[in-house]
Image: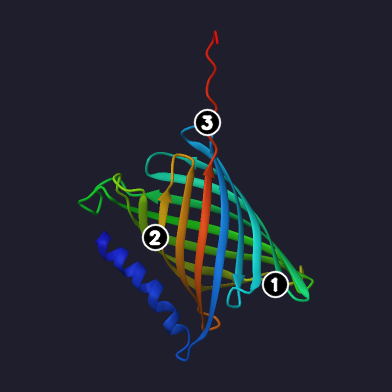
Amino acid sequence: MANLFIREFFLIALILPLGAKSQTTDWDFGSWYGVSITKNWTKKWSTNVDFQTRLDSSSTALKVAFTDVGVNYSINKVFSLSGNYRYGVSSFSPITTYTQRGYIDFKMIKPKKFLFKTKRINLSLRVRGQVVYGVKNLNRVYPELLLRPKLTVQYDSKKMPLKPYLAAELFLKLNEPTYTFDNAPRAEAYFEKHRITTGVDWSVNKHHSLRVFYILQGDMTRSAVNSIIGVGYEYELPKKKKKKLYD
């Protein structure tokens, strides 16, 4: 039953855009580049600061550059919770758009050998609740609400540093934002976008890791498809060594 759900989720993420409009598509190519700094304070608490630049229009124009700050709490080996704040700047000449985004992630990682007979396959489900405020065309937007479930399957072997993965994500828009205080955002739930991501994580050593990925993203409201390549670097700050009492 669970394996059927996994197949259905990936299948829906692939097929949904095809149902948006029969006559597709506007294709675009983009690239994402990011740096992440993380710190594990305890076994349960950690923080992160992320910097990312995203290009579109065949990777020739800035789509958005943002800074993301987050706090993460590991409830146990299966469940975790995190809260993040993101501030981004987009340059659409001659207009500059500013966005602020807050989101909460609830993540579940399957126990070892659950659904699969091998310990090498990791399965995780992340559900993100997202609120976006912004300034667009010199008008303030109030607010945009989204729900984003994401399912990831990753192959993890202790014998090799490379961890390939496949992920599917759906963007469920919960309202239609407005540009004034006078009109309240209109409740209207529909699937706005989807993402299929494949990539490889490489643990260089204890503190340095790299991620290379490819994203196929469909916009179901405009019948558009984006092809995206990306590279990310993560640095984990080392823990402070405890000083000996008589050092």
Give the percent coordinates (x, y) of residue 29. 54, 76
Residue at image position (44%, 55%) is 126
Q: Secondary structure at mark 2?
A: strand
The part of the image, by quadrant, that contains residue 89 is: bottom right
Q: Secondary structure at mark 3?
A: loop
Residue count near mark 1 (Cα–Cα under 10 Å), binned few <14, some 14–19, many ≥20? some
In this rendering, position of residue 38 left or right of residue 185: left
Q: Which residue is mark 2?
A: 151
Q: Which amino acid type corresponds to the residue marked 1 in the rendered image? A: Thr
Residue at image position (54%, 58%) is 129
Residue count near mark 2 (Cα–Cα under 10 Å), binned few <14, some 14–19, many ≥20? many
Closer to viewer: mark 3 or mark 2: 3
Q: Which amino acid type corresponds to the residue marked 2 in the rendered image? A: Leu
Q: Which residue is mark 1?
A: 178
Q: Residue furthest top?
A: 246
Residue at image position (52%, 13%) is 244
Give the percent coordinates (x, y) of residue 73. 50, 41
Q: CA distance from mark 3 to mark 1?
A: 46 Å
In this rendering, position of residue 12 left or right of residue 186: left
